[in-house]
Amino acid sequence: MERSRLRKHEMEQTHVPASTDTRMKIAVVCYPTYGGSGVVATELGVGLAQKGHEVHFVSSSQPARLDLLNERVHYHEVAMLHYPVFEHSPYLLALTGKLVDVVRHEGIELVHVHYAIPHATAALLARDILQHEGIRLAVVTTLHGTDVTLVGKDPGYEPVVSHAINLSDGVTAVSESLRRDTLEHFHVEKPIQVIPNFIDLERFKQRNPCRFTLALAGENQKRLIHISNFRKVKRVDSVIRVFALIREKISACLLLVGDGPERPRCEQLCRELGIAADVRFLGKQEAVEEILSAGDLFLLPSETESFGLAALEALACGVPVVSSRSGGLPEVNVDGVTGFLTDADDVQGMAQAAMRLLHDDALLQAFRLAARKQAERFDIHRILPLYEEAYHRALQAVRVP
Ligand code: GMT
């Protein structure tokens, strides 16, 4: 690295933040995909930029909810090098190289990676490379879900993820349940701070339902909603089976938002159960808050769910949730207050819980109010400062000689 540029970097880094008001230069690494950790990372980054920090997103393509680039929000695409020798191009190395470049040229002091695999390993490698040039970089890793509960704990990945957790300068998990799972499945000495996911209560609130959604349902039909990426863990087939039982007793329609590998099987199941006319596959949608506002109930029977951001979005729009009690869902959906919790494979139980609410308007209304109140606990304005504090602690840690 050129001397002058190095000096500029050092000068910026000698300004140890005195308080959590200090502006930081942060790189955010995430998957760009619709849903989950990519959404949390994007909304966190944009929120930090609104508070005056400079945020650089680093991803394989522009994150789905990142529509605003300005003087404090930047995006750097990880370009893949394709070469005939590679059966699969090494994303880990491409990301590491991009991080080194962005840190060098933008004076980044902290990298926040969302989803450990392979982002945390890439950030640690970048930190090592930069250390040889005299640049100190803090790495904060946020564990989101299957990076721990499914993929990460695979014996082939476990030592790599344990190493990434132990060597990060700060580690957070999105729920207490995920923190426990991490301690159970990994060889971890590092303290893990729980910082729950958050919600923008201004965006996610009861609002005029989307006209398109209303047009899809009959006048007196109850509307059930499910939103996911249609992967096996989401058990969208159970959503359909629960709905089939409800529909035997109540006039209702099911709105399915999102897309993914299980969708064709789910479409087939609807035909086999003879309910296809009342089930709408809406695909990926941007204005989920408008669709949710048309809903009476949200269904989420996931096999594993470290947090359940979609459930929180539903609650914020005043829509009660009937979900499994897997993972962190009980930390979001309060049984008997904001919805009901059942075992993940209890299709009958879920249908009964749903019908209890759909049959009783007064109860449904009480749950709607409680749902919004619960969502207020996860207000972005309460959670964002927790990340700022975590960053400051990580920065202090790398600055101690
Ligand atoms: O881990 C995944 O399945 C993907 C991950 C993501 O990157 O989309 O989703 C997880 O992170 C979300 C945001 O923190 C949580 O709300 C989800 O509950 C979690 N998914 C699972 O645990 C299955």
Image (cartoon, rainbow, N blue to C red):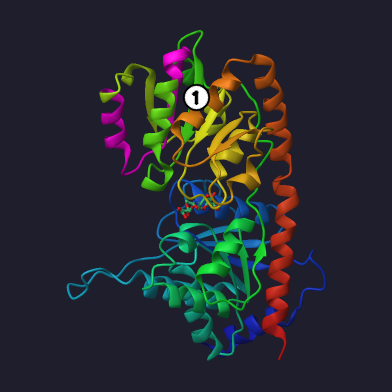
Q: Quadrant of residue 156?
A: bottom left
User: Residue 396, position in %: x, y?
Assistant: 73, 79
On the rendered structure, is 172 left or right of 78? right
Residue found at x 82% / y 69%:
19
Element on which disc 1 rests: strand
In the rendered image, the quadrant that contains the C terminus is bottom right
Near-viewer residue (286 or 302): 302
User: Residue 386, position in %: x, y?
Assistant: 73, 60
Q: Is residue 174 visible?
A: no
Residue found at x 33% / y 16%:
277
Ligand 1 closer than 8 Å to label 1 CB:
no
Q: Is residue 155 visible?
A: yes
Question: What is the three-letter code of the residue carrying label 1?
Answer: Leu
* Magenta residues (range): 246-271
User: Residue 212, position in %: x, y?
Assistant: 46, 19
User: Residue 4, position in %: x, y?
Assistant: 59, 86
Near-viewer residue (346 or 337): 346
> Would you name the residue on which mark 1 appears?
224
Does the magenta-highlighted stretch encompass residue 176?
no
Callout count: 1
Compared to residue 292, the image places residue 328 above or below, namely: below
